[in-house]
Image: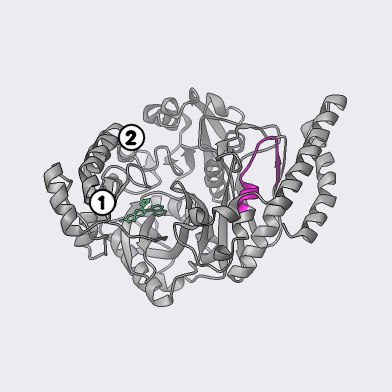
Amino acid sequence: MIKKVLVANRGEIAVRVMRSCREMGIETVAVFSDADRKAMHVRYADDAYHIGPAPSAESYLRIDKIIEVAKKSGADAIHPGYGFLSENATFSERCQKEGIIFIGPSPHAIRTMGDKITARKTMIAAGVPVVPGTTEPIRDLKTAVEIIREIGLPVMIKASAGGGGKGMRLVKKEEDIVSSVSAAKSEALAAFGDDAVYVEKYISSPHHIEFQVLGDTHGNIVHLFERECSVQRRHQKVVEETPSPIMTPEVRMKMGADAVAAAKAVNYHGAGTIEFIVDDNLNYYFLEMNTRLQVEHPITERVVGVDLVKEQINIANGFKLPFAQQDLKQSGHAIEVRIYAEDADNNFMPSPGVIKHITEPLGLGVRHDGYAYEGYEIPIYYDPMISKLIVWGKDRAEAIARLKRALYAYKITGIKTSIPYLVRILDVPAFIEGRYNTHFIEENQEYLKPHQNCTDRCKDVAAITAFVDYLNKLEKLQPTQVGKELANNWKDFGRKRSVLRL
Ligand code: MV4
């Protein structure tokens, strides 16, 4: 039985994992870099160990140091969160060897799905539809031209060791094949140390729909339905929702069964996600499998009513899944938005710095997964995502209204955040109507620019912030008191906004 979990991560996900541990009566161990001495996950954990300098290559990615801390602290298991070592087969293997439980899938599952060509072959053998294309690495440029002619242009060239859009190239014209393939190969070699690339037919206006799966170590695998993740910017998800607005019960059943078949093909245990690319006629194809807990997992938790981290831990303990497929139902609608410390009005420049004031939204149907607090400095070294806002409604319209209400109430000063940008997304007609695909952001640039009301509001905010700075200097107020001052100013402000319907 797992009694103590080392969380090999930072930020909101480290805190989120520890919350489930605490509910289960499991002790938690944090690890932290120089940049994270004052981070929330360090404060939240029962115990915390320093593992190195700020750059992740010297801290959160150091397998040896993390294993050492696990032993020293008496942790019997490690939860990797997402990113960092979460999809590192060597790490999972090393844990096994050291007698520490890795809360995640087997090294074999990670390895098979991590190599996209092997994953494609495995899916074909399992009868799961994949995008038409190659199942062997492109050997040389001459055969590349022949193969691509056969598949038909346009095609995507992808790195086998890549994923998530890294090292991807679209080829539209025959004369570009040679240069694109060789560029993709050298890019893949530089980025992943592996120049194997493969080719897929290009699906022109796809949806990104993924299925959550859970498997236990007794061979039981279920899916927990889909997440629609088509609102992306440079392969970064911005909004995720479930159910998908384009899904039908029939296609959901089929895709769910294929997601389970995909996981079965690698004897999957733990939480995982099958990514599909879906065209307008709801033809769908396996894209890749993520062998970790994902950022957007809370929308599934809310609509299906399952604590995915708790299930991960129970699976790692060797327990059987407590539900069968027919026990699982979707109820209502959930949406998540990711809040980044960046300036959407200045080319999404990262905006690290000290959080001067933060008021998180509360109320019916609102969940906030974050880690920032007043006085905390967002480090420059890691992903700029500072929190996730997850709302639930009985239907999509209620969820959107609730999300808007929550975003209006969400106040962060000291740094720039993507909150105003997210509000604008919720006002785009195509989003409101649920008619969008992966081109949503680029197709709606005009709507997503700051508009007049918004600009006025930003000026007001600037004035208030300047006022608070003035108070701060004049009276040497503590951040919390400054916060109260600010909150009072916002009271009127909120009322005005509800009239303006920004
Ligand atoms: C594709 C595609 C079109 N056709 N593959 C991007 C992320 C990576 N997981 C795969 N991606 C794509 N693969 C074929 N054969 C279009 C994309 C794609 C995309 C996919 C999901 C969400 C957003 C996207 C944005 C641009 C391109």
The residue that disc 1 covers is 173
Residue located at (80% from left, 60% from top): 499
Residue located at (56% from left, 43% from top): 12
Residue located at (48% from left, 71% from top): 329
Q: Secondary structure at mark 1?
A: loop
Q: Position of residue 254 (x, y in %)?
A: 34, 72
**Depth order, front residue of 324/232:** 232
Q: Secondary structure at mark 2?
A: loop
Q: Which residues are magenta?
A: 411-422
The residue lying furthest to the bottom in this view is 250
Taking 488 as reference, is 423 left or right? left
Q: Position of residue 29 (x, y in %)?
A: 52, 36
Sequence-first disc among 2 and 1: 2
The residue that disc 2 covers is 98
Q: Position of residue 142 (x, y in %)?
A: 12, 45
Q: Residues within 10 Å of mark 1 (few under 14, many from 20)?
A: few
